[in-house]
Image (tube, rainbow, N blue to C red):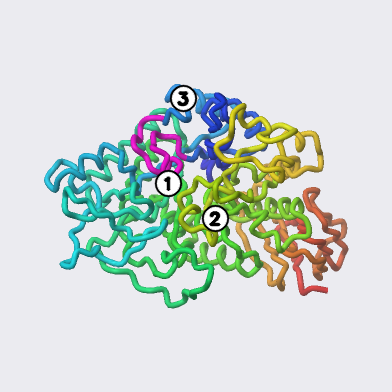
Amino acid sequence: MTEWWRGGVIYQVYPRSFQDSNGDGIGDLPGIIARLDHIASLGVDCIWLSPITKSPQADMGYDVSDYCEIDPLFGSLEDFDTLVKQAHARGLKVIMDQVVSHTSDHHAWFQESRVSRTNARADWYVWADPLPDGSPPNNWPAVFGGSVWEWNGTRGQYYLHNFLTSQPDLNFHNPAVQDAVLDVMRFWLERGIDGFRLDTVNYYFHDEQLRSNPADPDFRHGPHSASPYEMQIHEFSKSQPENLGFLRRVRALLDQFPGATSVGEVGDSHRSVELMAQYTAGGDTLHMCYGFDFLGPQFTAAHFRSRIETFFEIGPDSWPCWSFSNHDVPRHVSRWAEHARSLPGLAHQTAALVLSLKGSVCLYQGEELGLTETDLLFEELTDPRGIRFWPEDKGRDGCRTPMPWDQGLPPNGFTTGKPWLPLKPEQSALNVAGQNADDGSTLAFFRTILAWRKNHPTLALGDIAFCDTPEPVLAFRRSSGNDAMLCVFNLSADDHTVAMTGLHDGTNLEPVSERAVLSHDSLQLGANGFAFIALDSSSTATLGGLA
């Protein structure tokens, strides 16, 4: 079985917002099935399904009340089986979210655990006695605000929740919890799933001594400091060394199912790249990990280079999965708009960039349309984070609004009812049908560059070596065997010319290049221009300074 995932392209489907089939305004599994041809037409390798298991939806499915049942909002187990079968028939793998660092407080495990200190699942969650004055055991903050500790009067103890109070954390120090989680994964693997995206994979273990976290000395208070979570270094509340042992158990299970893979989400602002490399090293841990290094505001050549070089220095045999957008952050076309002359130009460039980095790639639904962040009113929000921290942090709803499929007015074929989040004119104008009819559209570009990438395996599997170019030019060489590709990006809204040496006569730009002109001694790059230059392994072609 080939390692299809290594250098593969994963397409994230956020089911609530992909396609509604029954008019209730919420996307579902039958809706995804109806749109599989669109996904397949892109040329991606795999679909990642955000949570579809049973949940009270306090955090849009990331609060699971039954790991082995499909939530009725999305359909049934039979619909799931049909989706997997239909995806496989189109050559698409399917992975699904596993949210196992915590459950919903509606889950039967927690309902049992909360009633006494002596029941069979009494220590399946993280319980702790109060301090003598009744206060919580330590200073750990929750991601969504307040303390991680919530009081339970029945047990006379606090329980740990890294997110909402209705999302209690499982106690992975208990081997029975690990066994139960692995049983859940086996259930889905036996049902035909091709692997998992593991939510908050570095949150599984906490410090058993419950030591308080230190303050972050580099944090700077300001008028837009939305959450105190960023004021600490989370040394003890997550990212514990015991995690590696459990990840090896996950890999051992996955290895029993040929072709099954894993993508871990690492949420750590101080050690993200280090943990990504550590969690994918040695061939006996996870297959891939992604962090948030490329999901923030930084858009400089130095930033991209430093994160990638650091990753492979720490873990030469480790494997990353890079992404620029997902369901947790503002869409990158809006996030990086200040560096662009046109948003479609930025959408094309960022697609070309992420698809030429060493590693696997995750694309978020709508990215192929160049979708921008939706500007929502407070009363339109559903995200608990946005509601709590508005307006400094508007939450995640802006990147989760429905896919615009048809031409015309919103909701553009997403639903026959009222969509759970509104579709606004800016996103409506970027609909699939209109772009299908336009050979110059962002959608057409995605299909073109994904097909071109498949014909150049060096871009999926080759080594990467960066060129010493000044800002705002990012350049690197991908090489494998006798093949090499020089990749050059102007990360700005200004025109730049880069000096070139060592080019053979007759060397041309690859056809997917945009806003680029190559001569024997220079490369001209327009705003957000990018160039791909195919070379042989003996080529000494290099780039110099800006002309």
* Image quadrant where residue 542 sits: bottom right
Please tell me which residue is depicted at 41% across the width and 73% down the height of the picture. 216
Instruction: State the mark number for residue 394.
Output: 2
Which numbered disc, 1 or 3, marks the residue that appears first in the sequence? 3
Type of the residue with mark 3: Asp
- Label 2 or label 1, whichever lies nearer to me, is 2
Q: Are marks 2 and 3 in contact (CB under 8 Å)?
A: no
Residue denoted by label 1: 198
Residue 66 belongs to magenta span: yes
Q: Residue 161 location in percent, x, y? A: 32, 53
Name the residue rendered at 63%, 38% in the picture. 403
The quadrant where residue 358 appears: bottom right
| Visible residue check, residue 361 | no
The span shown in magenta is 51-70
Report the side of 536 relative to 196 (left or right).
right
Residue 258 x, y percent position in the rendering: 44, 35
Q: Which residue is mark 3?
A: 81
Q: Badge 2: few (under 14), some or many (20 or more) residues near its Cα, within 10 Å? A: many
